[in-house]
Image (cartoon, rainbow, N blue to C red):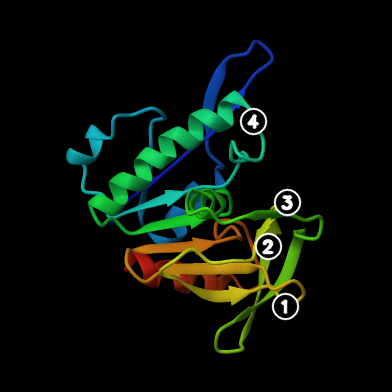
């Protein structure tokens, strides 16, 4: 099975201790699609990638980016994931940016994030380039309306034209504003996109 690595959220407890965690549904998803999933240690120097064959990286959801919410945990995660983005580009590792991950990638590319109160819902329709639609989950408070340079828009939200799926022309990068690990009505189609991208 292929080895895919995943970033973790950073959170602070009542004693001001920082800790990392990952949504357990990701491990169920890995089992279902038959790939090995390994959480990436926060603040790692990434040398462990030399010991393991990395077939892919997932930049998971959770947290806000520091530009939106200036909390220490968001800063720590942003700085680490910026370093990781440089690494995956340099080493041409297929990478999926999910929700927060897509927001961070777009922010790095100087794309504005727009506040919204209409994208937190279990089911929302998005329209693909071929005019087919998908029903996906949605758990974000910020939307993206402009694509970074050298990216292709694959799907949009029909009511506000916000971008829901992006892919890079230059690198092995795919972006979802929804969560593939969480149930959606169009789950089979989402799983197919995930499997095709990582060649599972």
Pointer 4 or 3: first along the chain: 4
Question: How far apart in space, not on screen, are marks 4 and 3 (Cα)?
Answer: 16 Å
Q: Quadrant of residue 84?
A: top left
Pointer 1 or 4: first along the chain: 4
Closer to the camera: disc 4 or disc 3? 4
The reply to whether the C-beta atoms of the residues labelled 4 and 3 are less than 8 Å apart is: no
The reply to whether the C-beta atoms of the residues labelled 4 and 2 are less than 8 Å apart is: no
Residue corresponding to mark 1: 158
Question: How far apart in space, not on screen, are marks 1 and 4 (Cα)?
Answer: 31 Å
Q: Position of residue 7 (x, y in %)?
A: 44, 41
Residue corresponding to mark 4: 70
Closer to the camera: disc 1 or disc 4? 4
Pointer 3 or 1: first along the chain: 3
Above/below status of 181 relative to 87: below
Question: How far apart in space, not on screen, are marks 3 and 1 (Cα)?
Answer: 17 Å
Question: How far apart in space, not on screen, are marks 1 and 2 (Cα)?
Answer: 15 Å
Pointer 1 or 2: first along the chain: 2
Q: Quadrant of the N terminus?
A: bottom left
The reply to whether the C-beta atoms of the residues labelled 2 and 3 are less than 8 Å apart is: no
Residue corresponding to mark 3: 141
In this rendering, position of residue 152 left or right of residue 92: right
Residue corresponding to mark 2: 137
Q: Position of residue 174 (x, y in %)?
A: 44, 64
């Amino acid at each position: 099975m292929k080895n895919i690595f995943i970033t973790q959220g950073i959170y602070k407890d009542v004693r001001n201790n920082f800790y990392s965690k990952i949504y357990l549904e990701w491990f169920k998803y890995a089992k279902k699609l038959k790939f090995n999933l390994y959480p990436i240690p926060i603040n790692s120097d990434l040398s462990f990638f030399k010991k393991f064959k990395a077939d892919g990286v997932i930049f998971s959801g959770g947290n806000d980016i520091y530009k939106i919410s200036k909390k220490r945990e968001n800063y720590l995660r942003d700085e680490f994931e910026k370093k990781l983005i440089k690494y995956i580009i340099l080493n041409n590792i297929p990478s999926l940016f999910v929700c927060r991950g897509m927001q961070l990638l777009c922010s790095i590319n100087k794309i504005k994030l727009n506040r919204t109160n209409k994208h937190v819902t279990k089911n929302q329709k998005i329209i693909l380039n071929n005019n087919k639609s998908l029903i996906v989950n949605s758990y974000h408070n910020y939307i993206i309306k402009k694509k970074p340079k050298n990216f292709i828009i694959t799907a949009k939200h029909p009511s506000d034209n916000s971008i829901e799926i992006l892919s890079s022309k230059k690198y092995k990068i795919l972006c979802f504003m929804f969560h593939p690990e969480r149930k959606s009505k169009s789950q089979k189609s989402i799983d197919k996109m995930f499997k095709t991208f990582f060649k599972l």
